[in-house]
Amino acid sequence: MTVEITPIHGIGEIAAGDDLAEVFLAALETAGFALEDGDVLVVTHKAVSKAENAVVRFDGDEELRHQVIAEEAVSVLRRRGDLAITETPHGFICANAGVDRSNMPEGWLALLPRDPDRSAHRLRTKIEQATDAEIAVVITDTFGRPWRRGLTDVAIGVSGMPALLDHRGTTDTFGKTLTVTEVALVDEVAAAADLVMGKATGVPLAVVRGVEFPVGEGRATDLVRPPGEDMFR
């Protein structure tokens, strides 16, 4: 299997009310990139949040930022200095409820989309209707990870592919039955796409081609570990 990851340049700044499908289709046409069945469009959540107006005015007042974080979180699990580890209404455990000022115009904070899975589905549906290609869409954000340093992109919204690949009951190369192996497929796709999108390049869209996945629908919330299975909270 060969996987190709292509960044789509020239998209520019997204504004509230923009039709992301039209914006992305225009950029793909300008780039001379024709979508094929099985392609995965990977989209940064900032593009979705801006288009859906999930943003807040910010004048530099840190008290206001903390208030926004508190409003966006359903619970605060840990605090250290200026950092709050929170649970969002989606069930995600992340820093500061996903409230972020990076890659935003001066004077604005980005919030997480209200329903990233639904946003991914709408975007996928419009692009499939325009191109006749059967694709998947993954919306990403940057999360830290317990017990490991550094950040990586993960999926917070998905449409057109399973979020998890369940290998339980299959066998490994030595014939041993796998009992706990579930692969976070959409997180792997998100992290791979970030290799060409970067954190400060202004590229909100990439196409990942060559990923093999079974037919089916998943949700990014499928990746959220139920509290009863959480050994670390």
Image: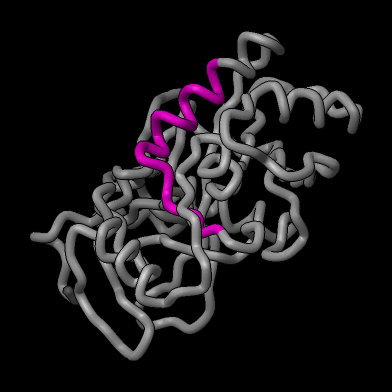
Q: Is residue 39 magenta?
A: no
The answer to whether one can see residue 224 in this image is: yes
- Image quadrant occupied by the C terminus: bottom left
> Residue at the location (45% across, 44% down)?
54
Figure coloring:
one colour
- Image quadrant occupied by the N terminus: top right
Q: Is residue 179 above or below residue 27?
A: below
Quarter of the image holding residue 71? Answer: bottom left
160 displayed left or right of 196: left
Quarter of the image holding residue 202? Answer: bottom right
169 displayed left or right of 232: right
Q: Position of residue 117 (x, y in %)?
A: 40, 34
115 displayed left or right of 194: left
> Residue at the location (33% across, 55% down)?
181
Q: Position of residue 159 (x, y in %)?
A: 46, 30
Q: Is residue 216 above or below residue 96?
A: above
190 displayed left or right of 33: left
The answer to whether one can see residue 177 in this image is: no
Q: Position of residue 42 (x, y in %)?
A: 61, 42
| Number of numbered labels in the structure image | 0
> Residue at the location (41% across, 60% down)?
98
Q: Work out whether residue 163 or residue 21 is closer to the camera in this orientation and state it.
A: 21
**First to last magenta residue range:** 108-125
Q: Is residue 112 magenta?
A: yes
Q: Is residue 17 above or below residue 197?
A: above
User: Which residue is most to the bottom?
Assistant: 81
> Residue at the location (78% across, 43% down)?
12
Q: Position of residue 116 (x, y in %)?
A: 42, 39
User: Which residue is most to the left?
Assistant: 228
